[in-house]
Image (cartoon, grey):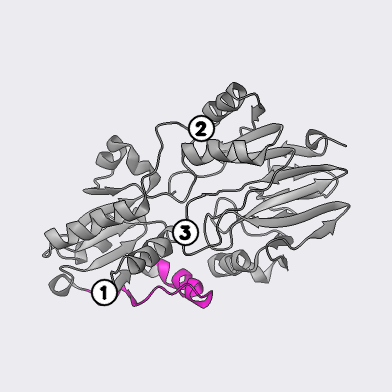
Amino acid sequence: MIHPRDWIQCRPEGIYCLPGEFYIDPLNTVDMAIITHGHADHARSGHSNVLTTAETAAIMQIRYNAAEETQFQLLKYNEPVTHHQVKIYLLPAGHILGSAQVVLEYQGSRLIISGDYKRVFDPTCASFVVETCDVFITEATFGLPVFQHPAIESELQKLLTSMQENPTRCHLVGAYSLGKCQRLIKMLRIMGYQEPIYIHGAMLKLCELYQQCDVDLGDIRHASVLEQHDSAGKLVLCPPGVLHDRWSRRFAEPLIANASGWMRIRARAKQKGVELPLVISDHADWNELTENLQEVKAEEIWVTHGREEALVYYAFQHGLKAMALSLLGYDEEED
């Protein structure tokens, strides 16, 4: 058996598979890339060839017309393909629609790259699947014990209660346009909120894609139809970056909320002028990260994208070999 350390490299572009001659989520334009999901810090434009899920390919096409320059090879989950003697297949990552873990098998060894993931139920995407491996590369965006995400239902109940208590105000919720927005809408529907939900224009095409993929979001409308006189009591979702923009002033006494795992840090919520922080993340929290390390039964853990040191230390304390990959260029802010 050849150990993955002998056929996987960390290069400035990202994680590279030597025998397969491809990258996973490269930061720069390359000839061959495997893309774990559609967020912009993982799925970038300009690659000549991309292997990914159909949903991620559709997201890339919406975001930057990737079809014009890229040849896509689409894989379903658990559908194997061999590229230069490397067996490749994808597993659900539970992060957003189409998100995938990448499984690589070469000369008797198996490595899994998690990409971004979460293990809690999300009605808008396939749930995370655990498989054993020799080396597991895990994200660590929330890789500190302080980050323990509450149930999404309890956070959304805070929002619904606030709407009942503040009927003259428009509730403006900052949420990442891809994944977080659609998850909030779907969970609110499941919890019984069936009123129209208004969304920023940047979210419209992605919500339409989710609905085309059989994720029913109910009655969603473009927020541009609202003015101050008719926006009281309404729920509006928008990218976090426009919460305090001129765009938000059109609404009646906007009550600013933000849905992010970073809202666990009260100082950050206060700094961003958030009146109603909602601790909702599409990344694994500390408990999910550590539980996963135990279940994949890997002899070695490689940690990237976030608070690497704490998770490496946890692995050492539990008898596992571990190291930090210290890859740069992956964004944590939007969560």
Label 3 crowd bin: few (<14), some (14–19), many (20+), radius 10 Å: many
| Measured Cα–Cα span from mark 1 to mark 3 | 21 Å
Please name which of the two marks, 2 or 3, marks the residue nearer to the observer: 3
Residue 41 disc label: none
In-front residue for pair 294/13: 294
On the image, which quarter does residue 57 sit in? bottom right
Where residue 91 appears, as percent x and y from the top left, is 66, 56
**Which secondary structure, mark 1?**
loop
Between disc 1 and disc 3, whose residue precedes?
Answer: 3
Where residue 34 appears, as percent x and y from the top left, is 70, 55
In-front residue for pair 322/330: 322
**Which secondary structure, mark 3?**
loop
**Which secondary structure, mark 2?**
loop
Instruction: Tell me which amino acid carries mark 2.
Output: Arg
Instruction: Tell me which amino acid carries mark 3.
Output: Asp
User: Which portion, as a residue range, is magenta?
Assistant: 202-226
Using residue 183 as the reference point, say whether residue 2 is left or right of it.
Answer: right
Position of 204 relative to 266 (above/below): below
At x 69%, y 57%, the residue is: 90
Residue 307 disc label: 2
Residue 327 in view, yes or no: no
Q: Which residue does the numbered mark 1 point to in the structure image?
A: 195
At x 57%, y 59%, the residue is: 38
Using residue 330 as the reference point, say whether residue 250 is left or right of it.
Answer: left
